[in-house]
Amino acid sequence: MTKDAQINLKGSVAIVSDFFFTAINSILYQRGIYMPETFKRETKYGLTVLTTTDQGLLKYLDQIVKQVEEWLLYGDVQRLVVVVSGADSGETLERWQFNVTIEDGAASGENKNPNNSTVTSNKSVKEIHNEIQAIIRQITASVTFLPLLNEPCTFDLLVYTSKDAVVPTKWEDSDPCYIMNSQEVKLRSFTTKIHKIDSLVAYKEADEWDL
Amino acid sequence: MSKSVVEFENLLSTSFSDSNKSVRTGVQPRWERRRQQQASYLDKDRRPPLSNHNGDRFIPNRGGTNSELSKHILRSDGTGSSFDSQDGDSNGSSVNDSKKDTYCNNLSSSLLGVDDMTKQSRVLSFAEKAPAPKGDTVNNLSVLYSASASATQKKASTKLVNRSIPSAPSRILDAPGMMDDYYLNLLSWSDTNVLAVALTDTVYLWNASSGDIQELCTIEGGGQDAHISSVQWVQQGGAHLAVGTSTGMTQLWDVNECKQLRSMDGHSDRVGALNWNQHILSSGGRDSRIINHDVRLSRHNVATLSAHSQEVCSLKWSLDGTTLASGANDNMLCLWDASATNSSRPRFKFTDHHAAVKALAWSPHERNLLASGGGTADRSIKFWNTQTGALLNTIDTGSQVCSLQWNPFEKEILSSHGFARNQLSLWKYPSMTKIKELEGHTSRVLHTAVSPDGSTVVSAASDETLRFWGGLFAAPTKSKNQREGASFATSSKLSGIMQIR
């Protein structure tokens, strides 16, 4: 592996936050939360992914992803959760969970200055993209087992941070929005050798009365 | 099953080691105590002997245990990583740890109704919420779930064609043992009017002119689940049939002599797709590779093409023989030049489908026009200009697309579908208005083939029937009588349902 192919902490953070952006967009498209016409096709990770063109939504996602990126640099993010809930009932219907684990040797604790971090990973971007590709494909394929969302839905993003993370005023504490009687399906994971992302989807089991 | 048991066992061992270590009950493994004792003998001056020495017996000392605290620590996670030194190599243990962590989380959250992550973390959400979805957000996936036929069926009000299209099959044959597997290609119709069908482990030939049935071959060896995974007639003459098997061998059969000519290796798993281009036989396998065999050579493997990452389920050479289209379970559609060699990359790699690409059909009317259809998560038919790589059109059919056939006479395309209505749809190209839907199959219509005269379509479904749709494709200029005469000279001789095996 050549030296310039190494990924440092910032590179890893960029990959992870870019993955979050793509994954959230894929979920919003595949689950039909926003109108499919508002999405445009893009080629990413050797796949065609759909990203929103809704300006309001883009701005919202940008703000979140930027802040998550900031927290990632300091190793403060533990989880990102996409909560899909009914617009009227407010009931949580689906919970897409991305757990962030910092791999050994990466910045944490005393090594918290992102600028002089020397941690690098020798995994090639191509390999990482292949792993991400597999997750995005699983999100796409999940429509075949997830129950149909037959009411208008909204979504929210929850970020689990460590206790001592610096939190801007625009962020507030939230409840974790668990689902009662949930079924869970573990999806694939990927690692940049600095950050490891595990993904999981939990959904409300179809009520037998609804069937 | 066994995996979860192992993880559970791992979990128990970590939680116990966690509690021991953190609460310091003084119970240590014997070898550890012995080592400490020896160390204390060596430098007695600096280190006093252990005070809580319990002799050689295992007597748990619960005196110093704070049960509340240990319960908390048992339930908390994220600390287990340093304790399992028995795991040896660091790589393996880190994988185990992450699994364990997730398992601990899942177990505690499902058993206790709490997620222990919250104890060490803050759950934050952005104060401004995402903009509410606008407009009519009826989920476009509902077509997959609502099986109501009337809701999705649109009556073709305007007259799109001036010929009569049959709405019922002209003939039904039983095909017991037709495998319900989307990734196989089990039907092929030769230009000598012989239909080859693979039913589990046997290939049958049905002569459409005479109605005779011949059993060509049965797979031997390969165990219980051995089956024929694909059949494909040679382009011209109808003398040779290529047969792909679940063992990864590609066989070549002489139909007249009823004997196997050769068996070609190269795949490590079943061969689900076959297609001919003159003397080149392309085979695609579950091992994600495509192999071009030159059947005239003893060293038959002339190129191994690898761009797919999952099972190749469809191969189609363009009619001029310059381009090979391949579809696979990794949702990719690749186009290969005929000159491709082992190191070649595909000319184009299309990623637009969101499910396995099995249905492929080259247009007989326009050069470089390819139609492709995707599986359940995709449900679309897409049209490609294979010269420029442009996506010309895409339509959502509302159902898994299993196969596509162009009408050789008209710019029309026939698609066969799976759940919920298992229909065949005839579309006008390029407007893609639906001309007709043909129903009758009670399970997904996996394969279709067109008769050599182009008029009849046969469809094979997992309901174990073959249905013949006589006169479905027909040149509008021909008179009806001519058509019928050409397609089924003997149709009066055979009527109703007939057993193929």
Image: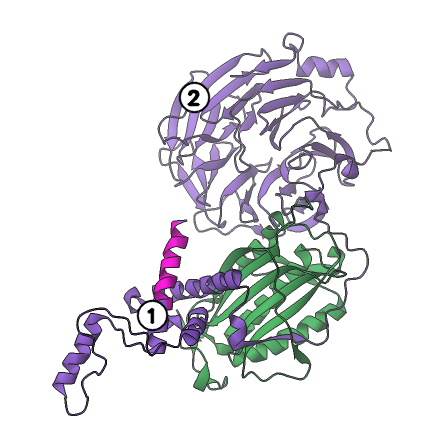
Reply yes or no: does residue B12 show up in magenta.
yes
- Nearer the observer: mark 1 or 2; the answer is 1
Tell me the colour chain B is drawn in.
Answer: purple
Q: Which residue is mark 1?
A: B17
Lower sequence index among marks 1 and 2: 1
Determine whether B495 is above or below A33 in the image: above
Tag 2: Cα neighbours inside 10 Å, few (<14), some, or many (≥20)? some
Tag 1: Cα neighbours inside 10 Å, few (<14), some, or many (≥20)? some
User: What is the tally of numbered marks visible in this picture?
Assistant: 2
Reply yes or no: does residue A41 show up in magenta.
no
- The reply to whether residue A42 is in sight is no
Residue B366 % position (x, y) = 69, 38
Q: Which residue is mark 2?
A: B217
Q: Where does the magenta region start and end?
A: B2-15
> What is the chain letter for disc 1?
B
Tell me the colour chain A is drawn in.
Answer: green
Determine whether B162 is above or below A175 in the image: above
Q: Main secondary structure of the magenta part?
A: helix
Residue drawn at x 48%, y 85% is A112
Residue B276 % position (x, y) = 51, 33
Give the camera-side residue of B26 and A133.
Answer: B26
Could you tell me if the residues under marks 1 and 2 are in contact, i.e. CB atoms within 8 Å? no
Q: Quadrant of residue A1?
A: bottom left
Residue A101 % position (x, y) = 48, 71
> What is the chain letter for disc 2?
B
Helix, strand or loop at disc 1?
helix
Give the camera-side residue of A36 and B194.
Answer: A36
- Report whether B311 appears left or right of B395: left
Residue drawn at x 58%, y 10% is B210
- Residue type highlighted by circle 2: Cys
- Residue type highlighted by circle 1: Ser
